[in-house]
Amino acid sequence: MFWGGFALSLLALKPSIGLPILAFVGIWLLFRKQWSGILGIALGCVALLLIGVLVNPSWVIDYINIGGDSFSKYFGLHPTLWGAVDKIFIQDGRSLMAGAIICLVIFMVEVYVLNGKRFSREPLDAFASILPAGLLIAPYSWSYDQILLAVPLICLMSRIAPWQGDKIAVLFLFGIVALSIFLVLVAHAIHHDVWSFLNSFVVWIFVLRLIRRDDRR
């Protein structure tokens, strides 16, 4: 668990999506009382911090400034809940607050789910839930970051196949791919890919639905 946490700390190299994911992982490890995993994440992040300091002692401040500028410059253009909420509350002036509230709700739901007994014996299920949730609440990200959805998709197919059969599992994957292609066409038509957040949202909902089904069995 220590070295697993240490390896996961590499996600901090892209803090905009890495920190939300690491926060969820840390909470999951806390619920499981896996202190060595938490220590691995902490030491890994400290090591990355110190390596960066050797190159540029003020890199943290520089990154915060650059990250803040990127969030402001591209706010409403990212395929996250922040971008989607901004498009709904366009020119309303309340999109920032609404986005914060909705992301907080998603965060609380995910924390509640991670506290379930199922995740103590099924780590893959935990990460299948964590990754799309992290992508949803990330301050900013781009569509290519959704490559992380490969993990929950593999998890979903491995659960759907013995439940509904291989054909249904394949149809499910084709459905997700079709949704992604459709959202690319939408992005081309409206000149932004905000609505591609639905990829992460749909996968997250399917994972939660599958977990709920398995808990009832």
Image: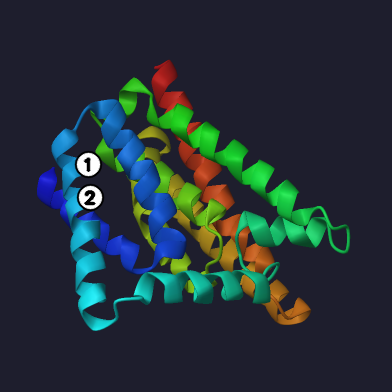
Q: Is residue 36 visible?
A: yes
Q: Badge 1: how crowded within 10 Å, few (<14), some, or many (20+)?
A: many
Seen at 58% across and 75% down, the residue is: 70
Q: Give the colouring mode of the picture.
A: rainbow
In the image, 207 versus 17, the foreground residue is: 17
User: What x and y, as percent, mark residue 155?
Assistant: 34, 46
User: Which residue carries the number 2 mark?
Assistant: 42
User: Which residue carries the number 1 mark?
Assistant: 38
Q: Is residue 77 left or right of residue 91?
A: left
Q: Amino acid at mark 2?
A: Ala
Q: Is residue 183 above or below residue 55?
A: above
In the image, 175 versus 73, the foreground residue is: 73
Q: Secondary structure at mark 1?
A: helix
Q: Are marks 1 and 2 in contact (CB under 8 Å)?
A: yes
Q: Amino acid at mark 1?
A: Ile
User: What x and y, as percent, mark residue 40?
Assistant: 16, 48
Q: Quadrant of residue 29?
A: top left
